[in-house]
Structures are given as C-alpha cells and as structure tokens.
Image (cartoon, rainbow, N blue to C red):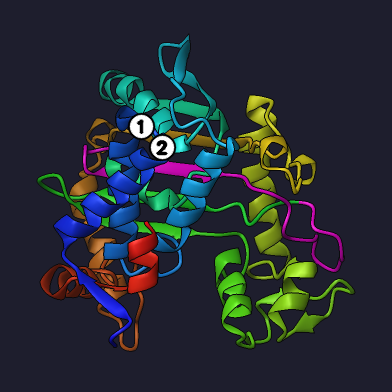
Amino acid sequence: MSDLMTLSVKEARSLIYKALTGVGTAPRNAHYFSEAILDTELSGLEGHGFHWLPYYCLHVKSGKIDGKARPKVKKITPTAFMVDAKGGFAHPAIEKGFEKLVPAAEKFGIAAMGVAHSYNAATLGYHTGTLAKQGLLALGFTNSIAAIAPFGGKKPIIGTNPMSFAVPGRRGKIRFLIDQSSSHVAWTAVKRAQEDGRKIPLGWALDKDGKPTTDPVKGLEGSMAPSGGFKGFGQGLIVEVLCAAMTGSALGPRWVHSPKPMMCRSTMVNFLSHCLPKRSGQNFSMRSSTILSKTSSRKKARGFPIRAARPITRNWRKRGFLSPAIFTNAL
C-alpha cells in the first residue's frame, strides 16, 4: 500500500486538468474532457479513465493530437449538425456541437450531429449522460480501429464500435444509461490483462486463426470476440455505417498505424441523435420508471445500468481514489 496515494475528488480533478494543460492542451479544451475522465473513474469503469490519461498526454506532446484545435460546427439542417474537430480531442468538439444540438432538440423535438477528424470519444456514456441530464433521450455511436472479425472469420473488419443510450430522469438526473461495445468485452480489458500478465476467459478474444484463446497476446494479435456472435458483429456494422459512412470519415480497416507519432493522427467519428421525451405525449417519465422498476426488482437481477455504478461512486467520493504513486508523480 505504500506505493499508493489517496486523492480526493478535488485533487483528482485538478491532477487531470493540469496534466492535460501541462502538455499543451488549451484550457478551453480541457474542462469537459477532465470531467469525463473523472466521471469515468467515479462510475467504476476501471481502465477507461485514469489508465488512458498518460497516453492522452503523450499523444498531445508527440503531435498526434492538436490540443489547441478549435472545433467548427456546420449546420446542415435546422436539426442536423456536423462538427469538424480539426485533428483535436473529441471532447471539445462534442461539447461545441452540443451547444447547437440541445437547443435544436428542445425546439424541434429531435436533432442529430456527427463529429469527424477527432481523437477517440473515450467513455461514450459520458456524452449521452450529459444530454440525459438536460432532459434529452440520447443515443450515441462511435467507430474505432478494426478489432472484430466477421462471425466465423479471422481478419478484423470493424472496431469494437460501442453504442450508448441514456434516459433522462427527474431534476437533472439520469434514469438509466447503457454503454456497450459490439465485442464481448472492451478491447481495454484484454490489453490490461496482457500488461498484467494475466490470462483472459474463453470467449473474450480469438487468435489470428479465429480460434478462442485465453492468451491476451494472441487475442490482441487476432480479433475481439463479437458480443452474441453474429449479432454483435451486426451491431458493430450498424455503428460503422452511422459513423464512418454517414460522415465520410475513416472506416475501421483504413485507420493508419505508424511507429512515428507525427504519422498516426487518428480520425474518430461520433453520431448522436436525441429527442425530447415530453414531446411524445405518452407520459414518458412514468412508463420508463415502470420498465426500470420491473427490471431491477426481478430476483437475481444484477448489474442494471446506472444503478450498479452508484455504490461505487459513493465509495470513491467518500474515501478518494487510490492511485499508484509513480503514476501520480509522473503526471
């Protein structure tokens, strides 16, 4: 335990923000991003928050990401918007787009936007959750580098391509939120097992011959296993079309890998659509509450979205974060 440091939520927020701005990220681009990383940790999504912060910083320093980029929003129709991240982080681009998206959804009942030429969107549920807190029913999609082979195939064609769905509650709360990848588990889970020298359960990944493996190294060389077999690949294909095909950005197989930092600028796309539940006139709040209560009241029901994270959030807020000293000092 001597190698661990305890950080309060306030200290963790400050550390994240100072790490990002310290490597050249503009302050205007760091606030929303910092809150997203912190929220991910508070939600108990280990491996998706602090774990990636050093990489974000390195990618700014190397020039892979432009931390000072100024996203530009283009109005396509009164309810459709396209955001060019200009080679920067996705978060400031999404935040900029929301400034147009939310008023449009409130006025017309539904709106959509896409984000192109950005770094990855990290935890997609943070973005849909942000909209749900503003009273919007939110759907989010994002594509990524090829990591899943077609069901029965060997060569990855699409990314883990997550989708997220957030339902608004009362008084700025989230009633429930779903954030899931098209793979059985997130790529990060296999990567962390490889870093820790641990085996992975069968069903997480396939080797380069398309066979299930418990070796994370072979899994990373091969393919992530699609969630639910061909259905998971189908979900990922839908996301690929909504993101890359709809916006003209890079398809999963065309993402460029390069050992040279300046040669591997990412292109990440998000497509989000939202509607205002009160416009439906169907007593949305009562009906969604009924669905939630009936689902969570079932015997042996576990891991229901948003509720599962609440005890973790309370615990983190109470005792603080445990962070490796070497990691904290480096940041």
Read off the magenta span: 131-157
Structural crowding at the residue carrying mark 2, measured as other residues with C-alpha within 10 Å and reported as few (<14), some (14–19) or many (≥20):
many
Camera-nearest residue between 66 and 275: 66
In the picture, which quadrant includes the C terminus? bottom left
Q: Which mark is residue 29?
A: 1
Camera-nearest residue between 235 and 67: 67
| Residue 161 place in picture, x, y as percent | 61, 52
Structural crowding at the residue carrying mark 1, measured as other residues with C-alpha within 10 Å and reported as few (<14), some (14–19) or many (≥20):
many
| Residue 23 place in picture, x, y as percent | 42, 40
Circle 1: element type? helix
Whether 264 is drawn above or below 279: the answer is below
Marks 2/1: CA–CA distance: 7 Å
Circle 2: element type? helix
| Residue 41 place in picture, x, y as percent | 32, 63
User: How many labels sit on residues?
Assistant: 2
Determine contact: label 2, label 1, CB under 8 Å: yes
Q: Residue at x 58, y 40 (%)?
A: 62
| Residue 321 place in picture, x, y as percent | 24, 70
Q: Quadrant of residue 108?
A: top left
Q: Is residue 155 left or right of residue 298?
A: right
In the picture, which quadrant includes the N terminus? bottom left
Q: Quadrant of residue 99?
A: top left
Residue 186 appears in the figure? no
Identify the mark nearer the N-term, 2 or 1. Answer: 1
| Residue type at numbered disc 1 | Asn
Q: What is the magenta segment's predominant secondary structure? A: loop
Residue 94 covered by magenta stretch: no
Q: Is residue 33 left or right of residue 89?
A: left
Residue 139 covered by magenta stretch: yes
Residue highlighted by disc 2: 91
Whether 319 is drawn above or below 83: the answer is below
| Residue type at numbered disc 2 | His
